[in-house]
Amino acid sequence: MEMDRLNDNTIRVILSTDDLKERGVTVLDLLGNKKQIESFFYSILDEVDKDHVFTNNEPVTFQIMPNKEGLELLISKSDDSESTDSLPLNGLQGSVVNNNDDSKIGTEEYDSDTAPYLNDPDTPTKTIIVEFKDFEDYVQLADLLHLESGISNLWEYNNKYYLQLILFTDEMHEMTYSDVVALLSEYSFKTKVTAAVLSEYGKEIMSKTALELTRYYFVK
């Protein structure tokens, strides 16, 4: 683990995949498990804040930037008197935590105005759930499958990864439903696991825009 003090209010921490493994987490855990995010952030803050600069009664912002090698974490404490030349925090995912209360970390929502479509009986949709041999196969698929109109959710269940696609078929033009199925068949396979099983027993890793998020975080 590497740590740099960027300014009086901001610490940058770089963790490799081995660093994460030692702490019992993965990048995917930090994208999909809010309780684990909270515990992980505080444990890292305890490790790097040896001088107790980040006091217990000030809000703290955590921002993570995952990549294939691990992640970069920016930890910043709020300061109303901060000068205008202080570091701008432009992380990919951020959370604000008040250390003096029981606030829970909130992660960014990736909702793209799809609810009206899902609730409209006149909007034809098709749902597909596929299973992957490993996560790398899923990443390869995400690199190639660019949905025009649809929702993609990534789930983990029994140590396997599942992609749930909800396609708005009337709004698909560049790629048809058959095209999507053909591409899925190259990197995944059919499964008997249903959406109800995933919802009840699985862990949702990425919601609504899983394919886009995967390309953003894992595809160079």
Image (spheres, rainbow, N blue to C red):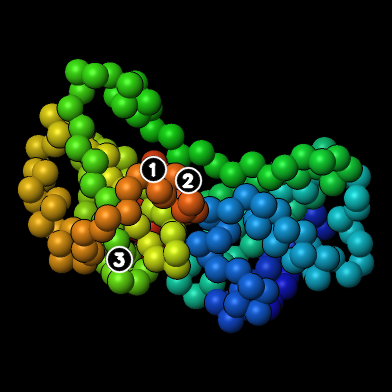
Local SS, label 3: strand
Local SS, label 1: helix
Category of crowding for the residue at label 3, using alpha-carbon neighbours closer than 10 angstroms: few (below 14), some (14–19), many (at least 20): some
Q: Nearer the viewer, residue 61 or 211?
A: 211
For label 1, the residue is 196
Category of crowding for the residue at label 1, using alpha-carbon neighbours closer than 10 angstroms: few (below 14), some (14–19), many (at least 20): few
Image coordinates for residue 184, horizontal then vertical, percent:
18, 58
- Residue drawn at x 92%, y 67% as measured from the top left: 51
Image coordinates for residue 94, horizontal then vertical, percent:
61, 47
Determine whether, in the image, residue 20 is placed left or right of residue 120. right
Q: Nearer the viewer, residue 121 or 15?
A: 121
* Tag 2–tag 3 contact (CB < 8 Å): no
How far apart are the two marked residues, 3 and 1, measured between alpha carbons?
Answer: 18 Å
Give the answer, above or below, for where 118 lies relative to 33. Answer: above
* Tag 1–tag 2 contact (CB < 8 Å): yes
Kindly indicate the quadrant of the structure image that contains residue 216. bottom left
Give the answer, above or below, for where 78 lies relative to 19. Answer: above
Category of crowding for the residue at label 2, using alpha-carbon neighbours closer than 10 angstroms: few (below 14), some (14–19), many (at least 20): few
Q: Nearer the viewer, residue 144 or 84?
A: 144
For label 3, the residue is 132
Determine whether, in the image, residue 25 is placed left or right of residue 156. right
Local SS, label 2: helix
Q: Nearer the viewer, mark 3 or mark 1?
A: 1
What type is the residue that disc 2 sits on? Glu
How far apart are the two marked residues, 2 and 3, measured between alpha carbons?
Answer: 20 Å
Q: Residue 178: tell me if it is visible.
A: yes
What type is the residue that disc 3 sits on? Phe
Kindly indicate the quadrant of the structure image that contains residue 101. top right
What type is the residue that disc 1 sits on? Ala
Q: Which mark is residue 200?
A: 2
Determine whether, in the image, residue 93 is placed left or right of residue 155. right
